[in-house]
Every structure is written in C-alpha cells, then in structure tokens.
Amino acid sequence: MFSVDKYDDIKWGLPGWRIEQRYKNDVLIGNWNEERRKFERSKSHFNSTQRTDFKNYGKQLPDVKTRREVKLQTEGLGKQFLFSHHGDAYKGNRITWYDQQFNKREVTESEFKPLRTWERQRLVWAPEKSDYPIQGSPTNFGLLEKKQEQWKKEAELEDLSIYATTQQLSFIPHQRKCYSYRRFAPPKFISSKFHPHHVNKDLHLRDSKYLSVCEYPPVLAPVI
C-alpha cells in the first residue's frame, strides 16, 4: 500500500525538490518595481522623526560618481537610452503581438504580401514577415487614463482623514508679555529649596512641595 508520509520522506532525497515552486498569494501588477523606487514627497502636516533630526548642510553634495550610481540604481535608464538607439527609425514599432493578431491589425494595416516566392540566391522564402512590420501608434488600451482617474480620486480623499480640533481652530496665540512669570523657579544658586549639587530625588527633598510660594515676590512699585 502506498503511503503519503513515506513519499514525503523520499521526496527530499530526490534532486527535483529544489525546483518545487512555493505558493505565493501576492500579485504584482504593472511597473511595481519601478513605482516602489520612486520618491514621493509627503503632504502630512505632522512632523516625523526624520524631519526633526534632519540637518541641512546647505549646498554640500556628495561625490559626482556616487550620485550618478545612486540615481542610476533608483531611477534606472531613461527611455531615450532604450528606444532611441537609431533615432526615430523604430518609433512606430511599438505594437504588441496581441494587438496585431487578436485585433486583426496585421490584416488591415500590414503591407505584407499574401504570396511569397522562393529566392534561389538566398535559399529562403521572401519576403519575410519581419521585413514588413506594422507601423503605427503604440498599443494603448486606456490603462493610463484609467489609472490617472483613479489616482485623482485617491488624492481627493487623502486629506479627508486629517481633522482640525476645536481648540486648534479657536486658539489665538498670545504675546510673551501676557504670561505671568511669578511661578517660575529661581536658579539653583540662589534658591533655598534646592541644593546646587542635589535634585529632588534626594531623601531630604522628597517631602518638599512642588508649587511653593515665590521666594522673591514681584515688585509692584514703579521703577524710577
């Protein structure tokens, strides 16, 4: 009788277990690799740890070679280096095979001859299909327009989760002279409650009150 448990033990001794595919429930759509490397400036109104700790060194830039390598690594090569090797010679050759065959563009737009002849000098059937590629605008099924409309709706709904409190809307900042300075703690070297070399964790200072009376009451008489 065949045993499944015994088969699992035998499987690890065979060379084929190394190429066994692992199940993944994630789906990568579109240019996900390029989009995740693109830097997007945040529109958040709140400070982050990086914003607080960041130090601006002015116009000091790293080495030119380092910047070039980092930019090439993050952004990749531009389309002018991928599609413009021979100028505009292949500008119209961006039609997909799906668009040619399933949409019948090779039947209506191609200049390929229906009958071919045998060439004795080259020993081939001529003309070849690759000699008459379909020229036209690139294949576009409206995906870009659909994504732009989706991104526009997401941008409109992005700021709806940021609310302003009643205190934030009604608060009026006051000038510094409007605040009272009577309860400010005096410096340690002129204070009778704190020793210059001790803090409130000292055993002799634990029973002292936090809000004590000001040691030097304000002078109300006008200064002459």
Image (tube, rainbow, N blue to C red):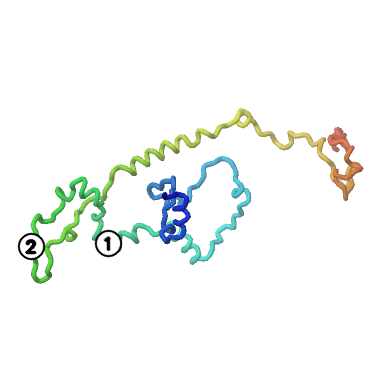
Q: Is residue 76 above or below residue 184?
A: below
Say which amino acid is labelled 2. Thr
The residue beneath circle 2 is: 117
The amino acid type found where label 1 is placed reads: Gly
Label disc, if present, on residue 126 of the rendered structure? none
Query: Which residue: 23% across, 48% down?
Result: 99
Residue 160 location in percent, x, y? Answer: 50, 33
Q: Position of residue 151 (x, y in %)?
A: 41, 40
Labels 2, 1: front one = 2
Q: Is residue 150 left or right of residue 142?
A: right
Q: Nearer the viewer, residue 103 or 140?
A: 103
**Viewer-proximal residue, 96 or 173?**
96
> Can you identify the residue that label 1 sits on?
87
Q: Residues within 10 Å of mark 2 (few under 14, many from 20)?
A: few
Residue 130, horizontal then vertical, whole percent? 19, 60
Q: Is residue 64 left or right of residue 114?
A: right
In what element is the residue under mark 1?
loop
